[in-house]
Image (tube, grey):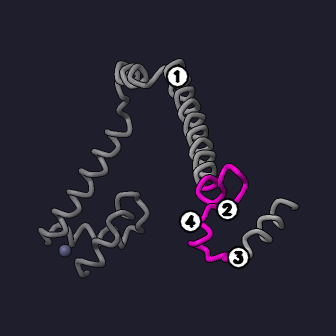
Amino acid sequence: MKCAEVQNKFIALQDGMLNPVEKHKIEEHLQTCNKCQWLYAMLTKTDQYMAYEKQQRSPDFLANRILASLPTHAAKQSINLQLTRLQKIAALLLVAIGLASGWLLGNMVYTTDHSFSTSVTDEFNLGSDIGAFEAFLLNQ
Ligand SMILES: [Zn+2]
């Protein structure tokens, strides 16, 4: 038997899934091949270690320490309350910025006596039709 064939049947050998003839061939190979012998020993040790680890329980104090390090319910509520306050403040700031921007833009375009400023008139080049345009806008 070749090494690869033997190694492919290691798990079946451990699980007792091989027929007596296959089992005998593999055991014969293991007696003569150091490489496969070493690999099979490592596989067996790994399985034994994994079985040992599955039986282990974490100490009770570890669970208590982890639970104690988590924020309490009151602390979580406080964090949520602070986030809600920050969201309200951010929303108010956005509204204030929007209102201020609208007010500033309105002052730039439209003067307090409800006529277009000359700078805007010059900028947009409304010319002599400004009076008719202003009347049109005020009648809307
Ligand atoms: Zn071998």
- Amino acid type at circle 2 is Phe
Q: Would you place residue 46 above or below residue 21 in this image?
A: above
Task: Give the alpha-carbon distance from disc 2 to disc 1, as whole Å.
Answer: 52 Å
Q: Is residue 94 left or right of residue 27?
A: right
| Sequence-first disc among 4 and 3 | 4
Disc 2, SS: loop
**Quadrant in which the N terminus appears:** bottom left
Disc 4, SS: helix
Identity of the residue drawn at 35% across and 32% down = 56
| Image marks 2 and 3: residues in contact by CB distance under 8 Å | no
| Image marks 4 and 3: residues in contact by CB distance under 8 Å | no
State which mark lies toward you, 1 or 4.
4
Please tell me how crowded label 4 is: few (under 14), some (14-19), or many (20+) other residues with Cα within 10 Å: few
Residue situated furthest front in the rendering = 128
- Amino acid type at circle 3 is Ser
Q: How many marks?
A: 4
- Amino acid type at circle 1 is Ser
Identity of the residue drawn at 67% across and 62% down = 116
Question: To which residue does mark 4 refer?
Answer: 119
Q: Does ligand 1 reach within 8 Å of label 1's beta carbon? A: no
Identity of the residue drawn at 32% across and 65% down = 10
| Sequence-first disc among 1 and 3 | 1
